[in-house]
Every structure is written in C-alpha cells, then in structure tokens.
Amino acid sequence: MREPPSESLHGVRGAALIVRFLLELALLTGAAVFAWRLGPDGWRWAAVVLAPVAVAVFWGLFLAAKARVELAEPVRFVLETALFLGVGAGLIAVGLTWPAVIGVALWAADRLVLAVTSEQERV
C-alpha cells in the first residue's frame, strides 16, 4: 500500500505554487515595463496596457491550469520557457539586467521545485 505524500511535501509544493503565481504577475509587469521603455512616444500608454494583456491572453489560452487549448506538457514547457526568457531578454535589452536575471533564475528554480514535488506526489 502506498503512503500518502508527507505534509512537508504539500507545504513545499504550496509555497512553490504561490511563488509561481507571483512570478506570473512579475511576467506581466516585465512585459509592461519593456513596452513602456520601447513604446513610441505617443503610444506608450497603449503599449503598457496591450503588452501584459497579450501575455495574459497567451497564458490563458495555452499555459494556464485550465487553458482553453490543451497542449502536451513538453510543448507547454517550451512555450512557458520562451515567454519568460523573451520577457527577460526584453528587460535586458532596455537596461534592466538584474531584475531580468533574478526573475528568470527564480522562475527556473520554481519550475524545478514544482517538477520534483509533482513526481514525488505520484510515487
């Protein structure tokens, strides 16, 4: 008979899911900052609104837990990676290197924790 996952595993996974949500918010913020820095003078406000909306729509369609388009996990991972790396690269391009590096590193660490805790829950 299998033993249920430990309480500490649930605690770690729960914390990682909270961090993931915060990273998703940071992704939207990063897209807005990138859009503000690169947007043409008369269009900056529109860019600041449209960039995070575009990211949120993309996330909702393909990457959210209840995404409208169901994709295989490897494809979802590649799209999520491209999104975080893309916004990170954009932030680096506008001179925000440290926030970009820290954000991408936190995202990678969080993905690793979520993958490990997911595997341990299945055992």
Image: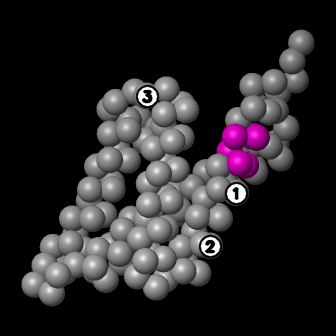
The disc labelled 3 sits on which kind of residue?
Leu
Looking at the rendered structure, which numbered label has been put on residue 71? 3
Residue 68 shows up from this direction: yes
Task: Judge from the rendering whether residue 11 lies leftward or rightward of residue 66; answer left or right.
Answer: right
Q: Which residue is mark 1?
A: 109
| Image quarter (top left, top right, bottom left or bottom right) of the N terminus | top right
Q: Residue 38 location, x and y as percent?
A: 28, 79
Name the residue at 54% across, 40% down.
77
The disc labelled 1 sits on which kind of residue?
Ala
Cα distance between the residues tagged 3 and 1: 23 Å
| Colouring method of the image | one colour
Secondary structure predominantly adopted by residues drawn in magenta: helix
Please report whichever mark, 2 or 3, sits nearer to the chain's N-terminal start.
3
| Image quarter (top left, top right, bottom left or bottom right) of the C terminus | top right
Q: Which residue is mark 2?
A: 102
Q: Are marks 2 and 1 in contact (CB under 8 Å)?
A: no
Cα distance between the residues tagged 2 and 3: 28 Å
Region rendered in magenta: 112-117
Cα distance between the residues tagged 2 and 1: 10 Å
